[in-house]
Amino acid sequence: MIELQQLTKRYGDKLAVDAISATIRPGVVTGFLGPNGAGKSTTMRVILGLDRPTDGVALVNGRPYVDAPAPLAEVGALLDAKGVDLKRSARNHLLALGSTVGVGPRRVDEVLASVGLTDVAGKAAGSFSLGMGQRLGIAVALLADPEVLILDEPVNGLDLDGIQWIRALLNELADEGRTVLLSSHLMSEMQLVADHLLIIGKGRILADTSMADFIAEASDGGVLVTAPEAGALASLLARDGVTLTSHERGRFEVHGLAAEAIGDIAARHGLTLHELAPVPASLESAYLKLTRDSVEYAGAVR
């Protein structure tokens, strides 16, 4: 379990994290989201003792991580997969780290096999591709069989097979009762794997809720309509309070009018409908709606 209690971090005059309080619980995958500059990396660094909080405290299993007698066995972390001696082989890198917590060759070989690096275990880490380096970073996180996992962009550089493997791994770790904190910009992947969401913007918590509730609350009741005479139907539906958005020829989205009402109008005017379906909400659309005022580095829209 990870507990953040009024966590605040300043870098000079810049406030990076502002009085964050949250509990990341075991048994679920918690997605950690926020725009660039929101404070995600700072929060993770404070949890791991790489930065000291200005105020408040971050606890891992009831104590500061820096007080853990065997840190690798307490938390497995992937913040930067490039943080490795590039001349050292993958196996020797893991053996060196494992020696600090009593992990020997047998466990090292098990972890190498689990991340798919057995065949290249003797190669220098500097020769690895981005995806292979990412797998090595995940191997480091898993090495001492920790209770808590903190992973920042773990699918970066992985192919489809690797992404599917990560999904299964994260679910397996959560099912074993471990605490999993996952940060990623890939909303589609996050929606598939995370059970709970912690979203921050400009250093403050914007949402701390389940994935299902977050998406459901963001749904605005839109209806997708496909019809051969879409233009004629759209004209009949247009009225105050109703918004029509065209997707492609013969297909549009309606907001402000229920599916039943759209069907009744089409029937009264003898217009054929090929599709009349609710617009499914997504994590991406819900996230963008929540964070639109919290983006610190926004690009120009053309």
Image (spheres, rainbow, N blue to C red):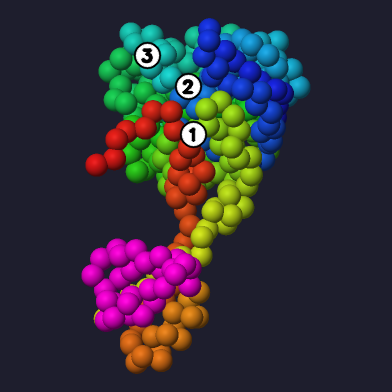
Label 1, secondary structure: give it.
Answer: loop
What label does residue 89 carry, if any?
Answer: 3
Residue drawn 38% across the image and 9% down it: 85
User: In which quarter of the view is residue 207 placed?
Assistant: top right
| Mark 1 nearby-residue class (10 Å; few <14, some 14–19, many ≥20) | many
**Separation of marks 3 and 1 at Cα, in angstroms:** 43 Å
| Mark 3 nearby-residue class (10 Å; few <14, some 14–19, many ≥20) | many
**Separation of marks 2 and 3 at Cα, in angstroms:** 20 Å
The number of numbered discs placed on residues in the rendered structure image is 3
Residue drawn 44% across the image and 47% down it: 284
What label does residue 294 carry, if any?
Answer: 1
Q: Nearer the viewer, residue 233 or 288?
A: 233
User: In which quarter of the view is residue 137 placed?
Assistant: top left
Q: Amino acid at mark 1?
A: Ser
**Separation of marks 1 and 2 at Cα, in angstroms:** 23 Å
Q: In this view of the protein, can residue 134 be seen by the observer?
A: yes
